Image (cartoon, helix red, strand yellow):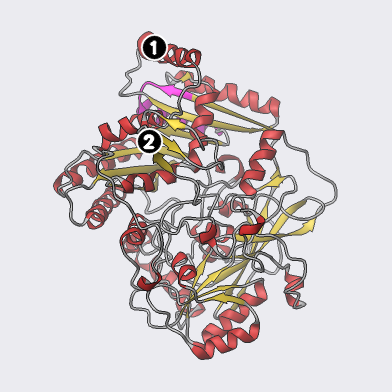
């Protein structure tokens, strides 16, 4: 989800609450300040300021590369006044996303992993700390772990062939009414294809090898809440299908168009942002650069710093959503109400099935004055999990704490940049000797936790000592700030690795769950073993890469992320095989007491398990809400239900 569409607001004086307009269900948000408070918050140290600038400018290209008249937002009052030409404000996401983003892969056009002429891996571009660095161990790791070879390379299509794009199903009467509103829209093939998918493995594979059977027929960019109301009214009048779109980072097939949908499909793209003013939300999911506030609301998202800032449901104060029945919102913006079931919880997690979120008021905080990274090495995964559970029990978790298993630790080592000096290499060797020889840690068993502390400097240092003291009781050894910082540095580039793998016959994906503490170890072990077993049974000729990490902790349990990949040379239908294996892994998760999803959502990919997850009666309740709010299935993406 985004590189900071909501990291701060654009008011002249810093607000304490921020209202975002409009926020698409699976996409980005552009936001204006609401209820600016007097006075200014504490400033941030230069590193925090730089981080905010990087995140808030996550999609800002050069002025010449921007679509000329599209990047602007209107406050509700401006929109009601018909001020479409008033006070344009630059958006982080251009209309023509293809100008700066890959059309058939992850992220920016100029950023990717490649093997250079020397056969060494490197990361291109200038946008990330890893950019321009050589990764001398990655090639060897891919060869040893996945059986990949530079001799076996696939070249994907460099350009979209518009002749492959399905023709648009046009409702001329709707188009005539739409033109009268003067709301911006496009029927161009590239714009339509860009909004026909998220980032599931099978979606990207289709783009590299072929084309979707059904894509949106028209892309519309509303400028404000009132624009969305008009579009939904027209869709109801002409019986169209609307699929909200924002960042396009869905990994649940939520953005795919139903293949048998014969109505005109409208992709409603509501990309907007907040500007800088020294505040942040603290909500930082791994897809933060490209996802959006609306997508976070629609999927009940979670971020790596939820220990301090909370999940999206903890940040939301007020939501406004346009549905075919009308607008849903509460009467006031208060911290809590006892007025029956919370209507926000019908909206959060609805995945674009009920309407379009147009405004979200969220909590913001001053950017923390101090930030410090850390890391701890444990003898094994079991000790690490026990430590994280104790930290959660004592309610002293840092802003972020992540525990990776041994396979992922080895993978992280493969992504280590080339050492700049002999002295640094010597120190690394000493550290390894100390841990493995002097302390007796088995290199094939040890695991690592990365830590991120934020807040007042004195409190951070006290907090750090408390966490390290707990870690020591479980055999943990402090492994330094550099390892922790490098672990978080990889957060926003790790998704680029899948494109590199696809170039060399390697397909991979991540999936997640939440699980009670007493089942974490068994679930992790059983799911990884199930993946290996399924690969063997399905004829995968190379050993798969199967790994996990604990990414978020709670009083009652944790979120666990799985990564899995395999070399598909010799398999005629690799995506079908992959989906069979992932389905088996999901069934294993459920059998071991895990949830259907912690934060990715359900979409179309996982909805077959919804009845099992929330009961037949629970599913019936959700269907009843859908039938009342959207009786003609205008929001017909067929997610969730």
Residue furthest bottom in the image: 173
Whether residue 170 appears in magenta in the rendering, the answer is no
Q: 301 and 203: which one is in front?
A: 203
**Circle 2 is placed at which residue position?**
117
The stretch of residues the image draws in magenta is 376-396
Q: Position of residue 334 (x, y in %)?
A: 70, 59
Residue furthest front in the image: 117
When the figure is inspected, residue 25 is found, relative to residue 482, above or below; the finding is below
Q: Position of residue 523 (x, y in %)?
A: 31, 41
Question: Which labelled disc corresponds to residue 159?
Answer: none
**Circle 1 is placed at which residue position?**
433
Determine whether, in the image, residue 227 is placed left or right of residue 491.
right
Q: 151 and 487: which one is in front?
A: 151
Determine whether, in the image, residue 424 is placed left or right of residue 518.
right
Quick one: SS at disc 2? loop
Residue furthest right in the image: 38
Residue in the image at 58% along x and 46% along y: 310
Quick one: SS at disc 1? helix
């Amino acid at each position: 989800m985004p590189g900071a569409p909501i990291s701060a607001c654009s008011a002249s004086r810093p607000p304490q609450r921020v209202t975002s307009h409009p926020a698409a269900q699976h996409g980005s948000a552009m936001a204006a300040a609401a209820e600016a408070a007097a006075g200014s918050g504490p400033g941030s140290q230069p590193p925090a300021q730089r981080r905010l600038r990087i995140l808030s400018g996550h999609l800002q290209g050069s002025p010449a590369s921007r679509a000329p008249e599209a990047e602007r937002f209107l406050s509700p009052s401006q929109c009601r006044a018909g001020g479409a030409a008033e006070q344009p404000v630059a958006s982080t996401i251009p209309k023509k996303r293809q100008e700066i983003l890959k059309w058939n892969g992850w992220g920016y056009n100029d950023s990717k992993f490649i093997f250079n002429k020397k056969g060494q891996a490197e990361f291109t571009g200038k946008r990330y700390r890893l950019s321009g660095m050589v990764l001398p161990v990655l090639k060897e790791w891919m060869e040893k772990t996945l059986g990949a070879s530079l001799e076996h390379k696939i070249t994907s299509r460099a350009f979209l062939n518009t002749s492959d794009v399905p023709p648009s199903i046009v409702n001329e009467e709707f188009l005539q009414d739409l033109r009268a509103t003067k709301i911006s829209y496009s029927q161009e093939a590239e714009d339509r294809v860009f909004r026909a998918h998220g980032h599931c493995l099978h979606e990207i594979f289709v783009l590299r090898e072929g084309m979707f059977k059904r894509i949106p027929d028209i892309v519309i960019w509303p400028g404000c809440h009132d624009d969305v109301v008009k579009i939904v009214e027209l869709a109801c009048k002409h019986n169209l299908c609307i699929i909200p779109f924002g960042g396009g980072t869905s990994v649940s097939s939520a953005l795919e168009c139903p293949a048998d949908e014969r109505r005109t499909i409208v992709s409603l793209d509501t990309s907007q942002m907040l500007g800088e003013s020294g505040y942040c939300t603290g909500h930082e999911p791994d897809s933060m650069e490209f996802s959006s506030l609306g997508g976070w609301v629609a999927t009940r998202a979670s971020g790596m710093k939820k220990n301090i800032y909370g999940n999206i449901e903890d940040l939301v104060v007020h939501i406004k959503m346009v549905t075919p029945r009308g607008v849903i919102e509460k009467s006031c913006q208060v911290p809590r109400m006892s007025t029956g079931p919370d209507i926000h919880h019908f909206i959060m997690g609805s995945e674009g099935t009920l309407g379009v979120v147009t405004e979200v008021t969220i909590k913001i905080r001053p950017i923390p004055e101090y930030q410090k990274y850390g890391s701890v090495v444990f003898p094994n995964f079991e000790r690490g999990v026990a430590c994280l559970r104790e930290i959660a029990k004592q309610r002293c978790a840092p802003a972020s704490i992540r525990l990776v298993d041994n396979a992922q630790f080895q993978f992280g080592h493969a992504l280590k940049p080339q050492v700049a000096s002999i002295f640094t290499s010597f120190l690394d060797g000493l550290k390894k000797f100390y841990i493995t020889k002097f302390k007796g840690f088995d290199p094939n068993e040890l695991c690592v936790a990365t830590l991120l502390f934020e807040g007042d400097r004195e409190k951070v240092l006290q907090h750090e000592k408390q966490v390290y003291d707990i870690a020591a009781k479980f055999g943990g050894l402090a492994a330094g700030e550099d390892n922790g910082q490098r672990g978080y540095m990889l957060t926003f580039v790790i998704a680029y690795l899948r494109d590199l793998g696809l170039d060399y016959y390697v397909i991979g994906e991540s999936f997640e769950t939440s699980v009670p503490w007493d089942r974490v170890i068994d679930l992790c072990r059983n799911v990884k073993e199930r993946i290996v077993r399924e690969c063997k049974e399905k004829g995968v000729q190379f050993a798969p890469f199967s790994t996990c990490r604990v990414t978020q902790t709670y009083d009652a349990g944790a979120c666990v992320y799985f990564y899995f990949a395999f070399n598909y040379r010799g398999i005629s239908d690799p995506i079908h095989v992959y989906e069979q294996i992932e389905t088996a892994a999901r069934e294993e998760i459920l059998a071991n007491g895990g949830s259907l999803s912690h934060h990715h959502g359900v979409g179309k990919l996982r909805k077959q398990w919804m009845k099992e997850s929330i009961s037949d009666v629970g599913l019936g309740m959700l269907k009843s809400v859908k039938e009342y709010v959207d009786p003609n299935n205008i929001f017909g993406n067929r997610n969730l239900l």
